[in-house]
Image: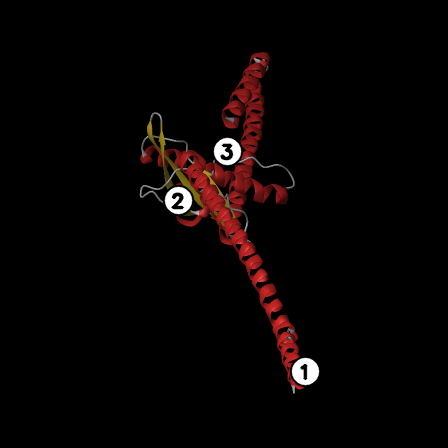
Amino acid sequence: MGLSYRANRHVETTSAVDAINYEDPNISSTSRLTEHGSSLDALWEKLTESQIDLTSASAEEDDSNEQEKVELIAKTIGLSAEGELPPNWVVTPPKAIGNVYRQRVASDPFVTEDECFRQLEAEQLPQAVCRRIEQLVSGEAGYPVKVSSPLPLGIGLDFILRDICRDKFTGTVATSVGTMHKVYALLEFNDSVDNELRHAWLNHERRTRLQSFGKYAAILIAALAAVYGLLRVDTWTRGYYSQQLLWGSAIAIIAVAFLLVR
């Protein structure tokens, strides 16, 4: 009995020890996966935090660049009377879009807007139209064309403002001498306007050539009339005043030619 009891006691003790030392492989694997997942989550949080910081820094840099751009525009071009930024065509000079040629012109800085508009209408707008006419007709004529003013061509300020000028902007700049204004104008030359400018130049050229032909014809007629008169007077005086009549006729022809050429 004693031996049997001790044997049973040894078996129970061994089973208890084995139960304590036994480690379930499924439980251990799950625990390790949990720990590995926790480490991945921590790493992802660190990467996410870094990305958020970079995005925030980039946004702050963009805001700083935008603010510098606004300040530069306010100093150079100027803001509107309401403090608004100028339109894109003022900041970035426009280019040709399809068959439409666009151009920006600007006045010099003045204290009042009226001074800006007067200079713009008297100088910048006509000069821009002259440059466009030169571009259009120089290639067709085959030689450089110089147009000093559109008025002799029949292109007045009313036509420019009505058919060519599409938009205006008045910029206000604060300077050390006070508030200054600058007026910008957007010009658009489409096919219709270009054809009108071409026809105006061609008509002007025809009139100029006709006037030149008329002057030369008048000089020729005056010379023939002087010769005919000289012969008639010489015949009437029987050659007594031939030399005086010759000099007088020459002077008269030169004087008539000078007046006609002017």
- SS state under label 3: loop
Residue nearest the observer in this picture, 260 or 112: 112
Q: Earlier in the sequence, mark 1 or mark 2?
A: 1
Between circles 2 and 3, the one closer to the viewer is: 2
Q: What amino acid is at disc 2?
A: Leu
Q: Where residue 40 sits: x, y (%)?
A: 59, 61
Separation of disc 1 and disc 2 at Cα?
Answer: 100 Å
Looking at the picture, which amino acid does disc 3 mark? Ser
Q: Which mark is residue 85?
A: 2
Residue, disc 3: 148
- Residue 4 is at least partly visible in this image: yes
Towards the viewer: 161 or 66: 66
**Callout 3: few (<14), some (14-19), or many (20+) C-alpha neighbours within 10 Å?**
few
| Secondary structure category for the residue under label 2 | loop
- Between 188 and 73, the residue placed more toward the observer is 73
Q: Residue furthest front?
A: 2
Neighbourhood count class around disc 1 (C-alpha, 10 Å): few under 14, some 14–19, many 20 upward: few
Q: Of the residues under marks 2 and 3, which one precedes in the sequence?
A: 2
Which residue bears the numbered disc 1?
7
* Circle 3 or circle 1, nearest the eye: 1
Residue 194, how many percent across, how many down? 52, 49
Residue drawn at the location 59% of the way across and 69% of the way down: 31
Q: Position of residue 100 (x, y in %)?
A: 52, 52
Per the image, label 1 sits on a secondary structure element best described as helix
Q: Is residue 247 above or below residue 164?
A: above
Q: Between marks 2 and 3, how big is the CA–CA gap?
A: 35 Å
Residue 156 versus residue 12 in the image, above or below? above
